[in-house]
Image: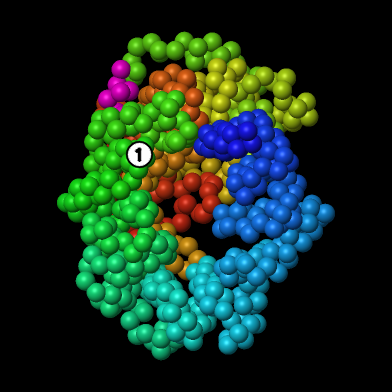
Amino acid sequence: MTTLLLDDFLNEFKAVNALHSKRSPRLDEMRALQRKGMALAEAEADLPALLQPLASTALALNDSETLVALYEKALDQGMTLDGPQMSLFLKGCERLIGTQKPLAERAEALRRRLLASDKLHPNMALRLSILGKSQAEVIGLLKAVPAEARGPEQTIALATAMLEQAESSENGELLAEAITCIDQNLPVLEARGAHSRLLIWLSVLVSGRALFLAHAGLADTSMAPALAAAERLDDRLRQPVTVLAALLDEAGSTGTSHRFRQAWAAINTEACWRHEFADGLTFRATVLEEVLAALEAGQTDNVPPASVALRLFRCMGQCEEFWLDPAWRETVLRRYAVLTAHIPEPRRMVIQGICHLASDAQEAADEAFAQRRGAEHNAAFNGSGHMTFLPSASVEACLSGPPADPSLLPEACDFKFIKPIQPQSRSCLTIACADPGYLAKFYENYTRSLFRQDPEARAHFHLMGDVADVAPELMEQIMAEPRVSLSSEKPPIKAPYYYATTRFLRAPLFMEAAGGDILLTDMDIKFMEAPSALAPNWRRNGSIGMRLYDKIRSFNAQGYIIMRTPRIETWGTLNASCLYLADADDARLFADYLSRVSHFALAKFRHSGNSNWWIDQNVIFAALRAAMQRRETLRIFNLLDVGIPFGAFRINEKAVLPARGQHPAMPRI
């Protein structure tokens, strides 16, 4: 009986966990699942089988108390933790650092017990020993161990940490120290098979830093120590493509497992895909073709073919050649189409559909996606962008005529202005939508950062819910602040995807009330620059500004040139967090298209049972394509080229290299 209950629990865990996400949390189901699993654990069921799902559930619920208790019980029973179980414990400990002192002390006691075990894998022992320490502390701790006493895992960790530190700093001496560390420990690194990855990574940093200095017109004196150390280690380190060629040649002919091992190290070195460096285009194309050839030959050195195929899928779009040379792209796509056979269903069909988008074959893509939509696929694809993809042809009918679902109309949702917008024709009004909880959580950060940048700015908030559910203190702030206005509606769909799409659904109403330019934004942002400071430049460039990843772009960042390529999937080629609409006829037309496509998409997918995570991006893509096909004269521009008032990095920094290439499915702007 206990075995049957355990099997039922494990099956239920897989189903609920697949549907749980930040955008569509299923907390009630997760709590019920946790209670069921804990009851089994108390009944002395198979704890080794229960530990991983219960720990994962506790992490999802932020239930540190249960997590710690589970691992105390496991160690008391003499369990030896496997890799996934250890990883979940480490994640839980990281959350407890500096908080909940009694609980943190219990977690620390567990950490000590694990470190004292003679059954602990050296890599896990290392991760436990450096838990909670800063990068500098980790480096200091590992350096303090005498070289002759340092284990291989510690040596690899030290070299890795030093390279990470050098990559995040403009200090050339840090790079020189990392090179010296690798040079001194090369025999150990070679013996453990880590030298290829580290040498490639190191070469990319040396070359990338030199390229940045050359483009910025700066002297390379800060790089002198690093260059000298690089030449001592290997005089080819300034040319990553030469380092790669040497490693490949030493490993034998193309399509062999030894050669694959070197290419696999390169394809999994993130710096290769992040930085611009000398001959980077050739380097990345070579790596991709080597891994393609190895998978075609079936020589993947014990790496599961499905893992290789999935890594290739992500890296195809990170090759400049993919977006610059249509012939090369089509050749790679044809070869890759055969290799998707290694990817198990139902994922294979979705990836094949995404690959169709790289050729702008939208109907073929949607046909593939349609076979992997529906309630039976929600567990596997909760929040996947293909679930709400809208090919251009499908939205054509909704651009004119009455909407299909009257329940989404403003009057049906009791749309109204609680505190009307005060029209000011030359002011750019920022607009954000939120339910009562999100409004309470982010109102202060939003308005404080906006008004700090521009005391004369105006902000409008659209509440999706009942005003009575907003805290009285917050409503008093809103009503008393002359720069803030408020509207509301009763959401016909109470789900995060509706809240994310509402700004587009109601865009025409906002434009009409604003009497000037508007900027539609996320609620959870922090302004780094005043929209009013950027607005004159926006107006000079066009009437409709959106954040598009349609081309290859490069930016300054921490002494390197960072490269950003388009995503193959069209919902990843744009960002819904920022949309500028000027007080102009073509912007009003585009707002109408946005509203109509939003209405169409919400009506089409509202009963899917999916979280519909990417629906807002799919709406923008479909509306953009439709608008450009109907009115090629629309003055649309890319905010990435002009400036955005918020973001993780200063988006208005001048690109070091010009935008280049083009996603075939994206309109040319």
Residue at coordinates 18% horizontally, 51% vertically from top-left? 331
Q: How is the image coloured?
A: rainbow
Residue 394 located within the stretch drawn in magenta: yes
Residue at coordinates 73% horizontally, 60% vertically from top-left? 110
Q: Amino acid at mark 1?
A: Glu
Quadrant occupied by the N terminus: top right
* Residue 92 appears in the figure: yes
The residue indicated by pointer 1 is 345
Point out the residue furthest to the left here: 327
Residue 665 at x, y = what percent?
A: 28, 39
Write the start and end of the magenta stretch as one range: 391-397
Residue 302 located within the stretch drawn in magenta: no
Residue toward you, 594 or 613 = 613
- Examine the image and state in which quarter residue 28 appears: top right
Quadrant occupied by the C terminus: top left
Name the side, left or right, on which 221 lies relative to 69.
left
Residue 70 at x, y = what percent?
A: 71, 49
* Residue 171 appears in the figure: no
Name the side, left or right, on which 461 lies relative to 97.
left
Residue at coordinates 57% horizontally, 79% vertically from top-left? 151
